[in-house]
Amino acid sequence: MNSKRNVYLDLKSIEEAKKILFDQFENHVTKIETLDVVNAKERVLAKPAIAAISSPNFHAAAMDGIAVNASFTFGACEDAPITLIPDDNAFWVNTGHAMPEGTNAVIMIEHLNIIDKKNVEIEAPVFPWQHVRKMGEDIVATQLLFPRGHKINTYSLGALLAGGIFKVDVYKRPKVLIVPTGSELKQWHEISIDQLKPGDVLESNSTVLGGLCEDHGAQFDCHPMLKDNLETIKSAIKTAATQQYDMICIIGGSSAGSEDFAKPVISSLGELYVHGVTMMPGKPMMFGRVSDTPVFGIPGYPVSAIVAFEQFAGPLLLNMQRLPSKQPTEALVSPARKIASKLGQEEFLRVKIGSVDGKLISSQLPRGSGNITTLTEADGIIRIPANSEGISQKEQVHAQLLRPLSSIENTIVITGSHDNTLDLIADQIKAVRGDINISSSHVGSMGGIMAIKKGACHMAGAHLLDPEDGTYNISYIKKYLADQKVWLINLVMRDQGLIVPKGNPKQIQSIEDLKDKSLRFINRQPGSGTRILLDYKLKTLGISPDDILGYENDEYTHMSVAVSVLSGRVDAGLGIHAAARALDLDFVPIVTEEYDLVIPDRFYHTRKVQVLLESIQTKEFQDRVISLGGYDTQKTGKVIYQSDS
Ligand SMILES: Nc1nc2c(c(=O)[nH]1)N[C@H]1C(S)=C(S)[C@@H](COP(=O)(O)OP(=O)(O)OC[C@H]3O[C@@H](n4cnc5c(N)ncnc54)[C@H](O)[C@@H]3O)O[C@H]1N2
Ligand code: MOO
């Protein structure tokens, strides 16, 4: 360790930090360049676009037919048709032709009686300018087509060309240098997966931030990755600040660790304006100035990096091209459960959103800012203000939407117990219907039943054993969902058992073996079918939960139980065979259980649910399920029970 630890000097709110940023760099606007219109898509006009010519630039026939002077046709009727003589008092025209001298109307060919080559009759008069596109109808020469600041989209290209504008003056795209730092980082193209050692981290932020630069109209260069070394990073930033970059983003090393150098680099080379913003994720972000270039210290955690960029660097890049900040699309959502949040920092909470019974319901995703999937899984972001301790279940709140509402509305929301085949359904359904999505969240079987009761999902995955008669789910439906008609459809039969390390080093053969206090166990959360199964087994075997080391520690999915075993944190956990197989662990079978889908009748008959039910009955789906291991599909898709209330 060769450096002092950083401390945040003075945390700023997002608004305060933005004000400082814009006070400092408001006037940083890129230079102007002249481009051929055809190369100017997505660029921003630095000068107004004034039409050079009118469009059409002449009176043009709008239909195929014959051009006439309307006054010549007045008085024509069925009893007294008027004869037109082509090339004399009328002229054949096609759509788009210039109107011949002296004419001001077009009669469509289908309204003519063609007598012979020389004589054409009409039985009705026409009014002046009928079926004629007058000169300047669309664009008039000297008209302002677009003011400066207009972002040229595909439609704009058509208007510019039609208005005779072939070159435009646009703001240059800002150029950003992205500097990934961290001795632990490995480039994907320089390492194979099997060479990765504990502590190595695949570098991904520079690709993501580069993409975000482009989304904000900028270009980017990626600096080669730098080790955590103050002098190396300092020298790279010093050089970069003399080059033609409009912005520099140092990634990583923004927080308080001994190897976090962004802050000393910026302060020693220039001036640091802000270090620490009261937001989560992204708190340690910073910015300052080196030479005249804005330099950001972007936190290394992937979600923190994205939030920090989108809140600060992105808007500054837009301003450099005189574009306004992006305004996200929002919708009012109802949280499925109460959301707690820390006072004093504005939280960007990632949520899944489902549309159930016409109401948008949000369910919270994990908060970890190191987990990029909390964003890739998210349908929206709820911003919880710094002065709020959270959101109650009764409140409706605004969520920024990350995908279109139509796509959210076409999503089947599955809540409840976790099973690996739910991921297969999500993929399989896409093979037949690209517009239907699956969103599953894992809250345990009882959580799923309760979500159905509350109208918060379209279906629930459940495997709730009734110890009295050995049936699954039916008695729970009768007890908790007596007020509605539901269908119980089997998804799979699956093996539940003890997931143990490869080779089963502790020779665990049964649940009784867990009584050995030297064995560490990981449980599932209360209300999950697996937990109910364990409790049932313990009861019938006469084992007290106190006899099991780790009974009180729980995980939410089979896969996280398997990960706990793989990491060596525990010696065993109860879960499905497929989870053990997926991570190449050993498995001691305990029971074969029924995993079903509980579907309210009002959703059962909808097209999207029927598509799902059809897709689980295909051979392709069932073959994929079998290949996961530990599954039987003989009852898949069968109606197990139908309640009649
Ligand atoms: N004692 C404290 N520790 C931390 C604090 C704090 O206030 N006090 N803040 C935490 C918060 S909040 C955040 S956010 C992180 C920010 O960390 P750094 O910006 O210093 O980033 P690193 O430590 O370098 O990396 C964090 C994490 O991200 C990975 N990483 C870094 N760069 C990349 C990249 N280009 N691509 C992919 N992944 C990257 C890195 O390997 C680490 O795992 O600090 C907390 N700590
Ligand atoms: O800001 Mo950190 O991003 O809260 O994890």
Image (tube, rainbow, N blue to C red):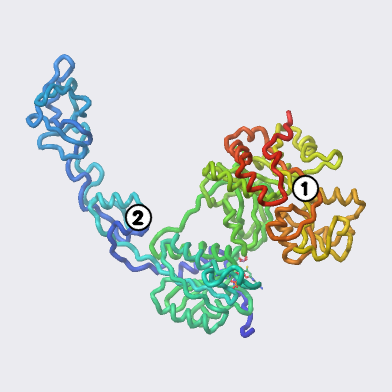
Q: What is the x, y in percent for residue 618?
A: 61, 40
Closest to the observer, 189 or 254:
189
Q: Residues within 10 Å of mark 2 (few under 14, many from 20)?
A: some
Residue positioned 47% across, 74% down in the render: 223
For image coordinates 68% across by 40% down, the residue present is 636
Q: Amino acid at mark 2?
A: Ile
Q: Is residue 117 above or below residue 473?
A: above
The furthest residue to the top: 79
**Camera-side residue of 339 and 117:** 117
The residue wearing badge 2 is: 152
Q: Name the disc covering residue 529, or none.
A: 1
Q: Is residue 463 left or right of residue 399?
A: right
- Dot label at residue 591: none
Residue 328 in percent (x, y) is at 50, 53
Q: Residue at x 10, y 29 (%)?
A: 86
**Residue 102: image x %, image y %?**
10, 35
Q: Residues within 10 Å of mark 1 (few under 14, many from 20)?
A: many
**Residue 95 appears in the picture as rendered:** yes
